[in-house]
């Protein structure tokens, strides 16, 4: 304990790592044999090493699990050659990708091209910094945790755009343009849906949000849950919304030109993104580490809920076909946007009328909110679903219609 | 303490280097990436001053939105690799930016940075300031002897109170500016003929 109590102000209680019990444990253990500044550095590096490896290993597990599950959904086997149930498949993939040639295309902006995979992985890793893995175990419990996650995830859009631009490839640029358009649009309903969560919890810190969930928020705010999952599928470029890397149209989108270890890093960032977003869903809507014997088994409940989130994403991916870009925009602005606004208004009114003098909500209040909001969610999803219905052509086009000149596609000189 | 100095200098070098890169690099796309880098470094400086909210909002808005819009605009520009050709407006531009810089430095130096209400609170907050590394947060204020009620009035939501209270007019003026910019962008995009 001799280092913590020194007067140099190196470890004040509000320091970035100061509130972390694991940090204190390593710090005090190392401080017996090393000077204070060195043990400060070592314990910080150890925690970073643990987190980075957890996310990268988790990404490998997600990639294997996704392929196995997709196989089951599509009535085939999936990877099953190496290890139990093919569990070592990610290692084989990684070995293959590392030994491949690392190509930087002719005419590419080399510096920006190389920076992209690093930025993408860094953005995903930063997102884990505020996730509470168990009771009081988070790298740092920021009082603006929700905003932090949003800010960090917005770094991805700049990385994707740089990838498209620096590749010197038309398809990559198309993919990047599509990806950024989708990212910017879906940011709006996602943030609006999180606003309701923050309002009920009364705090933006993820730890406080977990503590506030006497009733899990996916019951209290089903609309926000729905909008968040849909919006996050879009932000992660997953299948119903994956026009950015639609392989039947534009090869692989923004990472067309990437190969070798850079491609491996981009894939790690994508699967790690699924992992982090599932962690966010578990924390924000499924009550995080809360459960029976949460003091000891909190990590287990958290992991189970994370895997529920991952399963949801794979399920969505295997169920829905890819949308066109205009359909994606329609879903965002005509469907998710009004839903998130309805959720926000409903939550504001309910919190205003149900809260007590201290501004806090009891468990009974949360159940009342859940009852109202579930009915509201069903009704508004049915109502606004009508606006995004495609008009299905029931009869075959007539001869007259096929001979018509299609307006807007007229050839030069016809006007 | 030396560790914090190290981080501070690293962030400052990146911020200033990025800002210099914005004006010196010829390739417009790289210049806008430099701009994003400078924004992130400034966000890091905010974190060092215990202003996490400002830091996060800095990254969310400047990097996540404004830099992306810059890059969009750059993509729609011709001659990205060459950059702008030099013109006669360089000297006036230099004069104006020097004046703005001087005004900002003068404001930063002359401003009384203790914006807390009440003289007693001010003294205590200054005590907290001397104990803390940067802007005092709730724990520093409690250590300096403020009661919980005083801490609440000073730290939590102080920025929101100022934005919606004392500074509501500039706040709204800025939003009017944004509206003007949006309408101007629409007018430019529509073109003259239609």
Image (cartoon, rainbow, N blue to C red):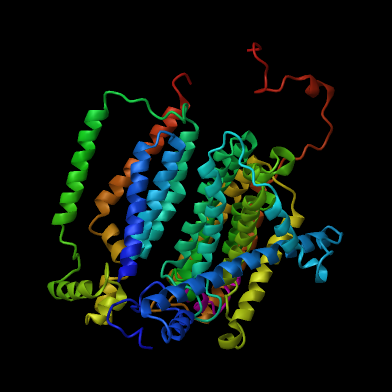
What's the residue at 57%, 62% (across, down)? Answer: A224
**Left or right, A348 with reference to B161:** right
Give B84 or A48, whichever is nearer the viewer: A48
Q: Where is residue A132 shown, x and y percent of the image?
A: 52, 74
Q: How many marks?
A: 0
Residue drawn 40% across and 71% down? A16
Residue A29 visible in the picture:
yes
Say which quadrant the N terminus of chain B sits in: bottom left
Q: Nearer the viewer, residue B111 or A170?
A: A170
Q: Residue A229's quadrant in the figure?
A: bottom right
- What x and y, as percent, mark residue A168? 59, 35
The stretch of residues the image draws in magenta is A208-219
**Relative height, residue A113 to residue B47 (above, below):** above
Query: Hey, which residue is sitting farthest front in the picture?
Result: A33
A401 relative position to B153: left or right: right
Q: Compared with residue A32, is residue A340 higher up or lower down, i.e. above or below?
A: above
Q: Most extreme residue toward the right, as rendered?
A: A76
Question: Can residue A244 be seen in this snapshot?
Answer: no
């Amino acid at each position: 304990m001799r280092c913590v109590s020194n007067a140099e102000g190196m470890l004040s209680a509000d320091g970035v790592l100061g509130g972390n019990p694991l940090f204190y444990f390593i710090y005090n253990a190392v401080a017996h044999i090393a000077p204070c500044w060195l043990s400060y550095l070592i314990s910080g590096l150890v925690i970073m090493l643990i987190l980075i490896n957890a996310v990268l290993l988790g990404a490998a597990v997600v990639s294997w699990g996704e392929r196995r599950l997709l196989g089951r959904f599509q009535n085939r086997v999936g990877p099953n050659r190496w290890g139990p149930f093919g569990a070592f498949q990610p290692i084989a993939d990684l070995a293959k990708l590392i030994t491949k040639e690392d190509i930087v295309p002719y005419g590419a902006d080399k510096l920006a091209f190389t920076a992209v995979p690093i930025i993408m992985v860094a953005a995903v890793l930063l997102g884990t910094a505020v996730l509470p893995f168990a009771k009081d175990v988070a790298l740092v419990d920021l009082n603006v945790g929700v905003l932090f996650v949003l800010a960090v995830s917005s770094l991805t859009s700049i990385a994707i755009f740089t990838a498209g631009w620096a590749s010197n490839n038309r398809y990559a640029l198309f993919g990047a343009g599509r990806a950024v358009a989708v990212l910017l649009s879906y940011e709006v309903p996602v943030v609006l849906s999180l606003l309701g969560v923050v309002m009920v919890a009364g705090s933006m810190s993820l730890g406080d949000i977990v503590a506030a969930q006497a009733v899990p928020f996916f019951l209290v705010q089903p609309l926000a849950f729905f909008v968040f999952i849909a919006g996050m599928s879009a932000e992660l470029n997953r299948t119903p919304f994956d026009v950015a890397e639609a392989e039947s149209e534009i090869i692989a989108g923004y990472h067309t030109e990437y190969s070798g270890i850079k491609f491996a890093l981009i894939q790690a960032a994508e699967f790690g993104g699924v992992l982090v977003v599932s962690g966010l869903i578990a924390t924000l809507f499924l009550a995080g580490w809360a459960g029976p014997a949460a003091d000891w088994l909190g990590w287990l409940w958290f992991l189970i809920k994370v895997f529920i989130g991952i399963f949801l994403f794979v399920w969505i991916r295997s169920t829905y076909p890819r949308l066109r870009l205009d359909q994606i925009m329609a879903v965002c602005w005509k469907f998710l946007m009004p839903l998130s606004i309805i959720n926000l208004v409903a939550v504001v009114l309910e919190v205003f009328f149900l809260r007590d003098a201290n501004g806090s909500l009891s468990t009974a209040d949360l159940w009342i909110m859940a009852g109202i909001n579930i009915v509201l969610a069903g009704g508004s999803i049915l109502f606004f679903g009508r606006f995004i219905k495609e008009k299905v052509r029931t009869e075959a086009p007539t001869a007259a219609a096929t001979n018509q000149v299609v307006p807007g596609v007229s050839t030069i000189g016809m006007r | 303490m030396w560790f914090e100095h190290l981080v501070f200098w690293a962030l400052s070098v990146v911020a200033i280097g990025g800002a210099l890169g914005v004006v010196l690099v010829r390739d417009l796309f790289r210049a806008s990436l430099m701009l994003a880098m400078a924004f992130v470094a400034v966000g890091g400086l905010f974190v060092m001053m215990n202003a996490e909210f400002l830091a996060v909002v800095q990254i969310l808005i400047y990097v996540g939105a404004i830099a992306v819009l810059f890059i969009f605009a750059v993509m729609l520009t011709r001659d990205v690799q060459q950059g702008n050709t030099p013109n006669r407006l360089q000297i006036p531009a230099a004069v104006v930016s020097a004046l703005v810089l001087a005004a900002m430095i003068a404001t930063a130096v002359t401003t009384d940075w203790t914006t807390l209400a009440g003289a007693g609170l001010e003294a205590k907050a200054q005590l907290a300031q001397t104990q803390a590394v940067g802007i005092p947060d709730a724990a520093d204020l409690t250590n300096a002897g403020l009661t919980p009620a005083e801490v609440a009035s000073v730290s939590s939501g102080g920025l929101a109170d100022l934005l919606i209270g004392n500074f509501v007019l500039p706040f709204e003026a800025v939003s009017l500016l944004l509206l003007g910019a949006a309408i101007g962008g629409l007018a430019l995009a529509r073109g003259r003929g239609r």
